Image (cartoon, helix red, strand yellow):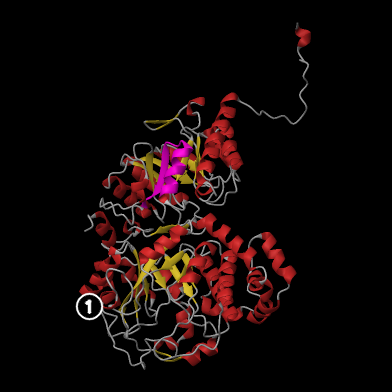
Amino acid sequence: MSMFSHVHPTIDFATLGDRARHASDADVRRILARGRAISLEDFAALLSPAASVHLEALCRLSRAATQKFFGKTIRLFAPIYLSNECVNICRYCGFSRNNDIPRITLPVDHVEREVRLLAARGFRSLLVVAGEHPKYVSNGYVETVLRRLLPIMPSLALELGPLETQDYVPMVRAGAEGLVVYQETYDEPTYRDLHTAGPKKHYAWRMDTPERAYAAGFRRLGIGALYGLADWRYEALSVAAHARHLLRTCWKAQVNISLPRMRPAAGGFAPKFHMSDRELVQTIAAYRLLLPHCGLVLSTREPPDLRDGLVPLGITTMSAGSSTEPGGYGAHFDETTWTPVGEQPGEQFHIADERPPQAIAAMIRGHGYEPVWKDFDQALVSEGEPAELALSPRN
Amino acid sequence: MPNLSATEPLRIADRTFHSRLFVGTGKFSSNEGMRDALRASGTELVTVALKRADLSGGHDPFADILEFLERDRYLVLPNTAGAMNAEEAVRLARLAVAAGLPNWVKLEIHPDPNYLLPDPIETLKAAEILVKEGFVVLPYINADPVLARRLQDVGVATVMPLGSPIGSNRGLETRAQIEIIIEQAQVPVVVDAGIGLPSHAAAALELGADAVLVNTAIAIAADPVAAAEAFAAAVIAGRLAHELGLGGTSARAVATSPLTAFLG
């Protein structure tokens, strides 16, 4: 089967977009009566203003579908930023190389210290993030970090600049089980306009990253658009099409979808397209009805009230108590209260939910859900060293 | 608590179970709620996903679902959910024993994370290895009678065919195949997955299944304790019906006057 960069242009987004704006009440009622969306056409209808009128019913169905497959549980994870060095110029990103921020790449020992702080808060699942820079994030640095972290963190996912399959293989061998790559925007002209320099310019290369990662052995694939860069309905339709494609082509992988909305960041980019809270909730429920088995991830970009409300509506995974700056946990967090203190000049963006992880876990319990800190064991990783590590006592 | 002595006990390997309801521990809204539901179910066997457990022996408070299981009440059956091939499943099983769990294992190998349908080839491969290593192996399988026989040939302790996909609550969609598996079985048959209603559980036991395993239907019920009680009662009813031979069917009306009266 073709890679998604070949499939995406063949999808009739004009017709789907029209349906996403002008679906009738009867269209929406028919899908709600069935209880699930079975096509991109159905999904488009669920994004429409007509469906917005039925948001409560939509959310009830979303909740039921989510509970059936994922139970009354929410998985928790934290990001750990290794480096904010980046060769790309992306007009909306705080790490963009033309932004004047302090540039940091953490030595491995420093990463481990940061991660031990997170482990003390309960985290057993980590998203390892780095800017795209061949000089700093290369030559086995990531693999060394992963190997160092495995005894502390059983579940490790990566969010790095896209690589070739063969360059991912050592990372899988070193213990990474998930890979996250956001297309940012699926609208190609907008993509070209926003990514003016660096390897990230290559729209199709980025789009096919999940498939290359799957070929290297990653078992969790995360995708998403950054809402605010283009029309949100178009982005949601593209992500849904992408997820459906991955479910067919990368059938052994768990596909997760994130729905990040633009946050204030260095560079002061002002988003042209707004996705309201209500539209975000509607989109989450629509994803759930189309893709009942996909994980839906909610980050600390969103404010507390909204995150609290979304727990029972369809999401499956949340980050908590996050810093988006390399070294931010040790340098800018109060160790007692685990809340950010002062400025974080090297952060990618500023988070909106600053509550500590224990407060998030308590909030999840308050909704009648169980926060799940650990849902992966390194014994599941087939190759080499990670399994040996898993068989030795942990410190 | 249901009257567990109403039906024959079930023997698997060297253990006897008075309850024919096995319960899974995933998807509960809290560990405390899980504990209460397990008690109410009267179960004597609970499965737990090793990927959620702390296998280091360090009693990690953030990663130890095992801490909430009353080990003196239940046989804890570690499962290999998350394993995508035989090698991973075998490694997990070995790790569980090293961490002090029993050498029983519910073998689950499902490479497709969406429908969690079991891989027959890898399951057979792993079963062979684990049986040789002395494990009591309870494999989760599709309702495939030939695979069930192949697994019995390598020495598994039960077979656990699915009624329908995990979490679907759709009941015994594979009924016809399960009937064949039961008919041919030399080991207990435990219907696993898809049991969404007490009537599904009762139907499985009526058919002659030796036990059922229920998770989602109890874990996400509005009242998991009451749901556990309902399933416990249904399993007893279904088993009693099986033991009594109730429900024989006929395509035609059966005459109530004896046809052989003329014989005197």
Residue position marked by numbered label 1 in the rendering: A107
Q: Amino acid at mark 1?
A: Pro
Give the structural element (helix, strand or loop) at label 1: loop
From the viewer's side, name the closer residue of B153 and A170. Answer: A170
- Residue A37: in sight, yes or no? no
Count of residue discs: 1
Disc 1 chain ID: A
Residue at position x 69%, y 73% from top?
A50
Can you say whether B158 is above or below A246 in the image? above
Residue interval drawn in magenta:
B32-50
Q: Quadrant of the C terminus of chain B?
A: top right
- Residue A337: in sight, yes or no? yes
Q: Please indicate whether residue B90 sits to the left or right of residue B232 in the image.
A: left
Query: Quick check: is B34 in the magenta stretch?
Result: yes
Residue B3 is situated, as x and y percent measured from the top left of the image, at: 50, 28
Residue at position x 52%, y 51% from top?
B220
Q: Residue furthest front?
A: A337
Can you say whether B219 is above or below A126 in the image? above
Query: Quick check: is A157 in the magenta stretch?
Result: no
Residue A368 is situated, as x and y percent measured from the top left of the image, at: 48, 56
Residue A113 is situated, as x and y percent measured from the top left of the image, at: 23, 71
Can you say whether A267 is above or below A128 in the image? below
Q: Please indicate whether residue A358 sits to the left or right of residue A231 in the image.
A: left
Other-residue count near label 1 (Cα within 10 Å), few / some / many at <14 / 14–19 / ≥20: few
From the viewer's side, name the closer residue of A39 and A245. Answer: A39
Can you say whether B112 is above or below B98 in the image? below
Residue A248 is situated, as x and y percent measured from the top left of the image, at: 53, 66
From the viewer's side, name the closer residue of B230 and B18. Answer: B230
